[in-house]
Every structure is written in structure tokens, then in C-alpha cells.
Amino acid sequence: MDVSVTVNGTTYARDVEPRKLLIHFLRDDLDLTGSHIGCDTGNCGACSVIVDGVLVKSCMLLAVQADGASIETVEGISENGELTPLQQSFNEHHALQCGYCTPGMLMSATALLRDNASPSDAEIKKALQGNICRCTGYWNIFEAVKAVAK
Amino acid sequence: MLLREVEYAKPGSVAQALELLAANDGARALAGGQTLINVMKARAASPDMLVDLNGLAELRGIELAADGTLTIGAMTTYTELMRSAEAKARPILGEVCATIADVQVRNRGTIGGNVCANDPTNHLPPLMVAVGARMTIAGAAGEREVTAEEFFLGVYMTAVGQGELLTKIAIPAGKKDGFAAVTLGTEGTCICNAAATVNGSVRVALGCVDAVPVLVTADSPDGIAEAVRAAGIEPPSDVHASAEYRLHLAAVLATRAAQEAAAR
Amino acid sequence: MTEDSTTTVAPAPVEVQKGWAGQSVKRREDKRLLQGEGVFVDDIKRHGMGYLHFVRSPYAHAHITRIDVSAAEAVDGVYGTLTGEEVAALTDPFFQISSAPGANIKDYSLALGKVRFVGEPVVAVVAETRELARDASELVEVDYEPLAAVVDARHAQDADAPVLHDDAEGNLMWTGLYSWGDLDAAFAEADRVIEIPELHFHRFNSTPLECDGALVEFNRGVEQWTIHTNNQFPGFAAIMMGPAMKVGLDKLRFVTQDIGGGFGNKITSHPQLVVCCLLARKLNRPIQWTEWRTDFHLSMSHGNERWFRDTKVAVKDDGTLLGFRTKALDDAGAWLRYEPLGGVIWAQVTPGMYRWRHIELDFTQVATNKAPVSPNRGYSRMQHLWFTERVIDIVAKELDLDPVEVRKKNYIRAEDMPYETPNGCVYDSGDYARMLDLALELIDYDAMAGRKAAAKEQGKLLGVGIGSTLDSGTNNFGQSRLINPELQFSGNNEVATVKLDIFGEIVVTLGTTPQGQGHETTAAQVVADILNCALEDVHVRAGHDSYWNSHAGFSGTYASQFAVTGLSAVKGATEMLRDEIFKLAGAVFGGVPAEALELADGGIRIKENPDAFLPFMACGAIINANNAGLPEDLDVTLNCRYVYRPPFEVPDVETKFGNLTLTYAAQLHVAVVEIDPETGYYEIVDYAAVDDCGKRINPQIVEGQVMGATAQAIGAVIHETYEYDEDGNLLTPNFYDYHVPHALDMPPLATGAIESPSPFTPLGTKGMGEGGGAGIHAVCAAIQDATGVVVTDSHNPYRRVWEMLR
Ligand SMILES: Cc1cc2nc3c(=O)[nH]c(=O)nc-3n(C[C@H](O)[C@H](O)[C@H](O)COP(=O)(O)OP(=O)(O)OC[C@H]3O[C@@H](n4cnc5c(N)ncnc54)[C@H](O)[C@@H]3O)c2cc1C
Ligand code: FES
Ligand code: FES
């Protein structure tokens, strides 16, 4: 099926099998390998992206379902190659080790802060609940997000 | 990952969706996909066609009638419900939805999908039974309404037949509700759960203990544990709980949910 | 995680920090990872590559009576398949580390004739797309004749137990008796002998978020494979694969860049890598293999499950520990992929943190119809240390003594360091009592009695527990000879190269395969200090490439050693380079002696005459591109390779005596749990983790490791378990049932650190990162404290706590 999506401002039109998951489409067809795959049950959030303003796990919908949508992925966060305050905060707080969960974490944090610029501690943790990290124990990720919340 | 081949259709109306479903035995409705896509990844089920309900505005939205009845479109997501001012009329709904899975799942998972999936560990089937929800099912022959108790038939089986759709759920007015669960980790998958409503007597629906929610009633929260034990429930054993432990939890959680409901 | 989620108490620096080392320099690998520009194995693509999908066994134990791949191969877009029969024709079985009977088993990279666990790879199918490869694998016909399975290690040696490996004539894989000191005397001296019938350490692993994978290319012209992979110990994979494939190691080029977590679990992917290699050659195209989560759970690197049976502890009434006897029964799963090394690795920490001198441990490892075990963070020591800690708390309970006092009475003391253990290991440094004091202070131990009473009022049970681990790092591979005296391994090594390139670039290559430990950053810190230059001027190559010639037999990232082996290699190579720069500058300046020169501002100058300055760029250019006229005897390449080799002797095989590891980092954790007695549900309400890993090159990175290990411990003790039903089906094959803690599951954490520099390492550092086991015990002990019931299992989900309270 023909699918046209705009990812980080660039429009891509492709012929896609309906069965293809959005994450495979992004990674395999569009070469946007920043979003990752950490599970096969929708638990880990490594594949999180924002579709038409809504944070989703891109392994939990089909690419054809995103037809016409505007998608934001980790590759689109930085402007002109510079780290944003959120990304810098991750660096400063050592909120990543292997970095495999990081793209998904950043998307979840981005969605949170867009929705709620001054989240409480509890709101930050709840916003990150859908993202598994096996390296950091989350404490530093929490601190990194908290530091950029107003 | 890596689903079997499947056809995809995105109907523009409920009528069209019903036609597609009726015309094709292997067609399945795709709501939030937060259960169905997983099942397809495991290749445990492989529908021939997915009929995507996401474009159907008719199935979305929440209305509050003068008598306090809430009517919730099947395709309303948990997030929409949590944010809805109308849905605050029955606060338990938003409260429970806020503890289902995580932000991403709540952003896509739907009320209709949750009850149609009728996974025994899901949060909403027992809640719907406790609050006395009524489900509207549409098919070629028109619409019919069933109570939540009649709706749930078995694991992943409901009163929605082949070629039919759940279109909306009506929930009567009320505030005295409670919900208690023991979950895998904080706000995780339920090991056992109980939803309660106090309206003169106490109604408690238990999840995870049988293929469908189990309804028990008592005159007061104090009597509910006994009622649970007398209900002849034979819960399943699995890696998270033995039958015995589940049965014990059922009594404890039923009491807690009932007490919470009574205290409101 | 609640409000102030972290509190940190850090030691005063041991010495005045002059340079970069000791500072929490921000990690250099972060930028690419934060921008989605890391290169993980599944990100790598090649023209014409084929995707590999494994057909896996649905049975725990069965004969394979027929395999037919024709229907799969007939599918348009399917490139080909590989079966066990082909593997057996093309390769030899993998070399076995074990002595007999384990030595006799024949392990190929695909099942041959028989399957031995659910999820075992049976056939590989390669196709044009991932989806198609999976579709076609459903068309592969395999007929099985199911056999009875053995799932419980305690019954593996029963007379009627099904036998996995006929070649081994039973399920016993390896056994060895370890006995040190004078057990009879200890038990005679004891006031009491405390008996513990059975303790169980459960099966789980660290589930790195990225599963295994590879992209393998075969160059027909030179008959050489390039293996892009996330295997974390290419040195080990190479020595397994080369002989099996009957090729020299130079034919196997390993390349890694970013790895999405390893924790030991990515050491034993060599069977899958062999399959990729054979198919790359057979099909003449690059082969891409990505393991999915369920595949990983079913088949990859479970941690060693261990039973401790018939334990007898010799104690004095005052709590003095004299010694113990126990029988350790270890469940290897279906294959020995790194095993039975677990049968000796525990001996690095034989007495735990305690001064008992009389220890006997009868170790037996058996095969079962479950996924093979392999190293997992804290490998084999974690099990043993959990056991020793359990003994302490059970003894304290039996003697009605305070677990804090029993520990303090028996701890190896700071003044005893370096301390030789009963089996000849040398604990380099440490102060366990001080760590415990610090941890108790962080948790406000004195307030516990009041908190317990307050919890009781609320109908809750509160308990506090202590756990500790020793993170022994830098293995002496000579210990493998205690498993099999025939083995020709000993010592350890790691390599680094540092060079000055034409334009003055300082380029560092490592032999390691980091998975988040920040090697690019810490290595740069060490180099910049020695060359007295800016951090930005140091370029540390990401990842590993065996073409860089910066690896040796033990290269890799595993077993807590980078801060010792990796950084010492970096230090050695950089010092060589520094000396060469001095020599070169001396010659260029016309015979100026080294003492008169100094490194500064990205170059070298004459101390007395700073204007006489030779920037690194000039040094690099002179040697590499402008060298006419240099003195003939100037022996300078500006490309220095250093192999760090820790000082080790081969341990004595007869007495099983000798030093098995170089450094001993220590972890002391205290957990406070609050239990709902009605449901068994509990929460960790407070947590303190104190770490001592000697000198810390980058305290922030060290703290990050402590936090991550703690989170894994919390997951393991409450939720994470690989549990099987009696037919050998894994009941937790994905993240639904194998619950991994998330942000809401984390307790408030207070971290603390002391620094006891290692006297044995060039930088005073100790390997670290594997100390999670401390947390497992801390929670077990807290549950015991809260319930008053002896905890006998390392895994305590709510249901078990409820059962304990009944
Ligand atoms: C990681 C994770 C954790 C989760 N944890 C929980 C949890 O703790 N509690 C919980 O309750 N749920 C949980 N879920 C499941 C989630 O709530 C799903 O959203 C829900 O079960 C199904 O809703 P859906 O809209 O996604 O439906 P889908 O997955 O699209 O559909 C589910 C089934 O219902 C049918 N269906 C859907 N809508 C209709 C309709 N209108 N008419 C007829 N048939 C229909 C579909 O054909 C399909 O068979 C979790 C999911 C994930 C991925
Ligand atoms: S890969 Fe999408 S949630 Fe794990
Ligand atoms: S940093 Fe490795 S999984 Fe989060």
C-alpha cells in the first residue's frame, strides 16, 4: 500500500506491506535507526515516537496506520546538530549508559514537557513508566528530566 | 515483531466497517492495537484483514446525559477518558484508566478494545461489571444492548459476534466505587483485581480469577470476603500466583475495594 | 522512587586531583547516542543482505526424526537454509572447557539429532526480508519424537532421569571438592553447628535492552569473515569459533561499535555467529541476524541457578564464625557454553567478607532441559556471596544476635589487608566495617525500631536488611585449570594503542567492547593526564575491531576489569608515546635531555625556554611524513602498543590454592522493606548503597554502575525469574511475564562511597560494576527481619512472602 509520512519535517512516500510495523518501516525502509527495538510485546518503549503530537510505541501500530501523519523521532530533536537542553541534561546527569533506551526516553520526556512544563516528581516518573532502561536504574534519568522542568 | 501477511482497510463509517467485517470471516476490528498487534507479533492469531476503526469519529467521544448516564464511544482512548471533564461524573473510570500500563499504551488503547479483548488480567472488564455498564453492539441487523455481565463470555470472547462491533458503553450515574489490585510492580499487570460499587448493597467484580469477571454481592463490605469465599471460584495457577493465593487475594482485594467504595 | 530520590555521600578525594582522572568528566559517547546516531548492530545494512530467522524447538527434549526445508526454500525471496546436519559436516563441535564427563558432550551451533531445550535453534532460514524469513521458517517441517524432560537440577542425577547427552553418560557435567583449612577442628571447636537444609539462588539474567545480533560478510577472495556483532567478548568467541570452523583466527574479524547493554549475557553468542558465517559463505551474501526478545529469553545466557544443600556452619556462641560445609548444585541448562567455569569463579570470593578459615564446598554441575547458562553480572560470585550473607543472617537469627554485630565481629578488617583468603586469593584493600557504618547512617538505622513500631500500627511489617558483595575483578584465567587441568589458559591481558597521527591527532584504540561503561571518556581522561593536553585532543575510537591490532586473548568487556586492565593498557601505551615524544623533541631541539623538556598545551617544550615549542602536530608530521634527516638511531614510531599483564601465578591444581583475581571492589547495601501481611505485597521504602572500588577515575560513571546494578538486584529479588513448568516450557518468555522494574518501581536511593585504592594496580583502581548481588541479599534479609521467617530463596515475589507469613 502507498504510505506517505512526514518524519522530522521530511516527507517520505513508500510502498509498504500492510503488515509492516511502524518501527520496522522507520528503521528498515527510511533508515531512521535512532528509534530502537527492545522487546516484542510493547513493554519497553525503546521504539517510542510522537505521531501527530501523540506519544506512541511504534512497534504497536502498523506503518499504514501512520499514512498522512507527521512523526517525530529522536533524530529530529536536535536543532542544527546542537544538543537541546533536555539532551544536555541527560549528558550532565549521566542519564544514559549504553544509550539503547535513550531515544525512547527522550521522546517520552519530550511529550511530557510539552504537555506539562512543570511536572511534579510523581508526574515525571509516571511519564517514564513505559520506558525500560536496564543500565541506569532510572534515578539519573529522573534527575535529568527534573532539571529541565520548570 | 514480523506479523503474518494481512490486508488492511480503513473504513469511513461504522456501516462500512460492519460491511467489511461481515463480508470476511477472517476480518478483525483493529482498535488501539495494544493487544491485537501483540497477538499478531506472536503469530498467535493471524487475521486475514484488519478493519481499522481509528478513522471513525462516530465511535469516539464521551457524553453526559441529564440523568448522569455516561455514554462512552468504544474508540475513546484511556488518555481521552482520563482528561474528559464529563467522565469525572464517575471518577473511578479515569482513576482506573490512569493505572493501565503506561502513557504510550494509554494514548492508543481504547475502552472498547479493552473490554472486547477481555484478557482476564485487564482492568476494565471487572470495572464494567461492577458499575453496571451496558454495551451497545452494532451489526447488520442493527443495534442491541447487553449488560456487562452478559457481555463477557470467555477468555478473549465476548457477546460481540462475527461481523459485529461494540459501538458504545453506557455507565449509570454513581460515585461510590472502589478498585483494588495486586499488580506486577507498581501499576503493572494485575495478578488479581477487584472493582466495587456500593449502591445500597455492595457489588464486587473480581478479575484474574476466572475467564470472565466474577460478580459477588453482599449487604456490606464486611460481608464481601465471605461472599467471595462462598462463590465457588477456582482461579487459575500461573507463574505469578497459585490458585490458592489468587483466591486469598480475591477476598482481601474485594474487601478493600468495597471499603474504598463505601468510604466515598 | 519517591521525592528526594537520590542522596549521595562521596569520600574526600584520596589525593589532590591535578588532572582529569578523578573528575566526573561528562561522557563523550553521549552526543551520538542522544541524537540517535549511535551504531548498534541492527543498524548496519549491506547491499543484498539476507535476513536470518531461526526455527526453534517447541520441545524441551525430543529426537529430531526428520527435517524438510524444501517448502521453505521454494518460496520466492528465500535465499537458503542451514540445518544441523550441514553444520556437523562443515564444523567440529565446540571445544569444551570442562574435564570429563562434561568434556565429552558434542555441541554444534544447530541442534543435531536431538533438541534439548525449548527455543533451541534447529534450522536457519535466510530471506530477502525479515518478515519473509519468518514466514518461510513456518514452512520448515521438523518431526520430533518427544522425550521426558529434566527441569529440576535436584533430580537430574536420579536413576530414572532422562539423559540429555548420551556422550556424557548422565547429566553430571562437572564436579569438584574444594576444601581448605581444618574442617574437623573447626566443628570440634564450635559451640554450635547451625544446619541449613537448602537455599536456592534462582535463574534470571540482566536482560540487556538490546538483544544479540550480527551482520556477517564473507570475503571470498581472501576467505575471511567480517563479523559486525554485539558480542561483548570477541576474544572468547574467536577461540570458540576458529577451531570449530577449522580456520585461523585471522579469518574472523570482529567489529563492534555501540552495544545496548551486555552484563555478561552477550558473551556466548558464538553458536549463532557460526551459523551466520556458514550461511554468508554458503549463500554468498551478507547475513543479518537480529534476536528478538522472546528468542533471547528462551535461549540466551540465563544466570546460574544454584542450590546450597546440607549446609553446616561452625560458630561460637558469641557469633564468631569458624567455617562451613556445603554442597553446591549448579544447574547449567542444556549446554556448557561458558560453563563449567561457574564451578570455580565463585572461589574468587570463597569466604565472602568474613574471617572464617575452614571452608568446604562440594560443587556439582548438572545439565537440565533449560536454556544454557552463561555469565551474568556478578557471575557465580553473586550466588556464592548471597549464600554467605544468608548464612550470616541465619546464624544471627539462630543465636539471637544482631546481624550488624555478627558482621562486625567477623569482617575481614582494614588492618588485615591485603588479606589472604583460605584458598589463596588476596583481597587487595577495603574497609567493610566502615562501609557498613556509612550505609547504616545513610539509612538512619537508629530510627528503625521506631519505624517498625509505626508500621505495625498501620498493619504493616517493616524490616531492614544488609547485603554485601565483593566484585572481584581482573580474572586470573589460570583458575580454569581447577576445572580442567589440561587447559592452557592463565593470567590475563588487555591491549591499547595510542598514536600521534600526521596532523597531531592523538588516536587511542582499545581492545574492549564497551556497552555503556564510558570507556571513550575514561580512557581519554587517562591519556590527557599523561600527555598534559586537552580532553578534546584525544580521540578514542568507538568500539572494537580486531583489524586494529589492539586486542589480545582476553580482550573484551566483562568481569569487572576495564578500570584495571583496560586503563592500565591505556596508561602503558600513553607513557610509551610520551617517552617517544620526549625522544623526538630532544633530537629535534638538537640533543636536549628529557629532564629539560615538558609536555604542555598540546605539545612539548623546553622548560627553561618555553618558546622552543614543538606542537604535537609537528611531532606527528615529522615522524609520519617529513622524516628525512632524523638521526638514524632515533627509535620512534609515535604509534605505541602496550599489553597490560597483571601479575599472576598459575594456581595449584591439587590444593586449589592461588590468587584468582587481582582486585576486590566491595558493595554494602541496606534495604528497608514494608510488607502488607494480608497480601504479601511489599515495597522497598528506603535503600542505601555504599561502594568501594578503589580510586575512581570518573565518580559519576562509577555511581551510574552502582545505581544500575542496584536496580537489577531489585528486579531480580522481587520480579525477575526464568521459571519453567515441568515439561520444560519457559513461563516468563517476554517482558510481560518477566517484569523488569520501571521508573515507578524504584525506591529512594542514597549512595555513598569510600575509596581504598588498590595497591596492586597501576592507577589504584579496581574493576567494578557487578555489585548488584548485594541488593538481592539486602532485600532477602529485610524480608526475614520483617517477617521473622528464614528466607531460603533469592527470589521473593509477593506470593512467596505471603506463603512465608502463613
Ligand atoms: C505493555 C502493555 C501493558 C498492558 N497492560 C495492561 C493492563 O495492565 N491492564 C489492561 O487492562 N490492559 C493492559 N494492556 C492492554 C491494553 O489495555 C489494550 O489497549 C487493550 O487490552 C485492548 O484495547 P485496544 O484498543 O488496544 O484494542 P485492540 O488491541 O485493537 O483490540 C483488542 C481486541 O478487541 C477487538 N475489538 C477492539 N475494538 C472493538 C470494537 N469496538 N468492536 C469489536 N471488537 C473490537 C479486536 O478485534 C481485538 O480482537 C497492556 C498493553 C500493553 C501493550
Ligand atoms: S520495541 Fe516497542 S515497546 Fe519494546
Ligand atoms: S542506558 Fe542502557 S538501557 Fe538505558
Image: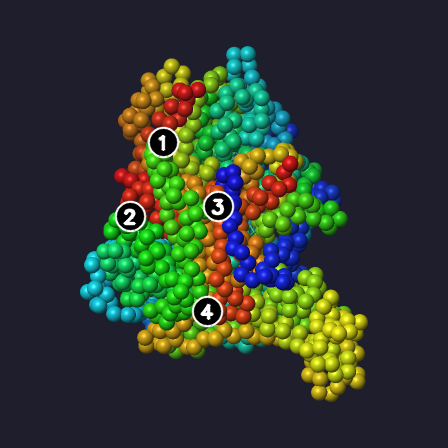
Estimate the x, y position of residue B88 in percent, counting from the top left. 54, 21
SS at badge 2: loop
Query: How far apart are the two marked residues, 1 and 4, measured between alpha carbons?
Result: 49 Å
Identify the disc placed on residue C790.
2
Instruction: Kindly identify which residue carries mark 4.
Output: C662
In the image, the residue with mark 1 has its CB under 8 Å from the nearest atom of ligand 1? no
Residue contact between numbered discs 2 and 4, judged by CB atoms under 8 Å? no
Nearest to the eye among marks 1 and 2: give it.
1
Q: Is residue B243 visible?
A: no
Residue drawn at (33%, 30%), measured in percent from left and top?
Answer: B251
Query: How far apart are the two marked residues, 3 and 1, measured between alpha carbons?
Result: 24 Å
Identify the disc placed on residue C749.
3
Instruction: Kindly identify which residue carries mark 1.
Output: C458
| Residue C693, above or below A130 | below
- The image quarter containing residue C356 is bottom left
Q: What type is the residue that disc 3 sits on?
A: Leu
C727 horizontally vs C49: left or right: left
SS at badge 3: strand
Q: What type is the residue that disc 4 sits on?
A: Leu
